[in-house]
Image (tube, helix red, strand yellow):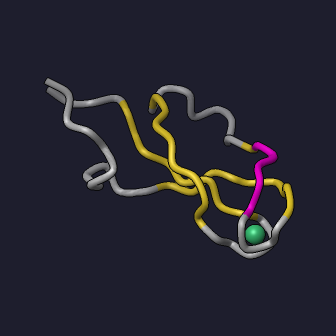
Amino acid sequence: MASDRVVISLNCTVCKNKNYYQQRSQKKKEFKVEVKKFCKKCGKSVLHKEGKLAKNTNIVKKGR
Ligand SMILES: [Zn+2]
């Protein structure tokens, strides 16, 4: 069964550090995730943008 879920990383727009990971549905491709989150490297809250990851990453829990 093909999964419609992809794992994305949220990259700091300042230092490009991958600080967060989350799953999202592939269908919602119309917009890119942009959130303001805290970056440890920058030491402050900065805008994070979505960057794509491979589908088979070990941070994805295999359901069932
Ligand atoms: Zn940063």
Q: Which quadrant, please, contains the N terminus? A: top left
In the picture, residue 53 is in which quadrant? bottom left
**Residue displayed at 27% across by 30% down:** 3
Q: In the drawing, does residue 1 fall left or right of residue 14?
A: left
Q: Is residue 58 above or below residue 24?
A: below
Q: Residue at x 13, y 23 (%)?
A: 64
Instruction: Residue at 74%, 54% (x, y): give it.
Output: 48
Q: Main secondary structure of the magenta part?
A: strand
Mark count: 0
In the rendered image, the vertical position of residue 21 relative to residue 28, given as above or below:
below
24 horizontally vs 29: left or right: left
User: Quadrant of residue 11 in the image?
Assistant: bottom right
Residue nearer the viewer, 36 or 32: 36
Q: Does 56 sit above or below residue 16?
A: above
Q: Is residue 32 magenta?
A: no
Residue 15 percent location from the top left of the image: 74, 76
- 45 left or right, relative to 3: right
Residue 20 place in picture, x, y as percent: 58, 52
Q: Nearer the viewer, residue 60 or 55?
A: 60
Quarter of the rendered structure image containing ligand 1: bottom right
Percent x, y for residue 16?
68, 72
Q: In this rendering, is residue 59 above or below 12?
A: above
> What is the span of residues highlighted in magenta in the rendered image?
35-39
Q: Is residue 37 magenta?
A: yes
Measuring from the top left, give residue 34's x and y in whole percent. 75, 44
Q: Nearer the viewer, residue 32 or 45?
A: 45
Name which residue lies at 31% across and 44% down. 60
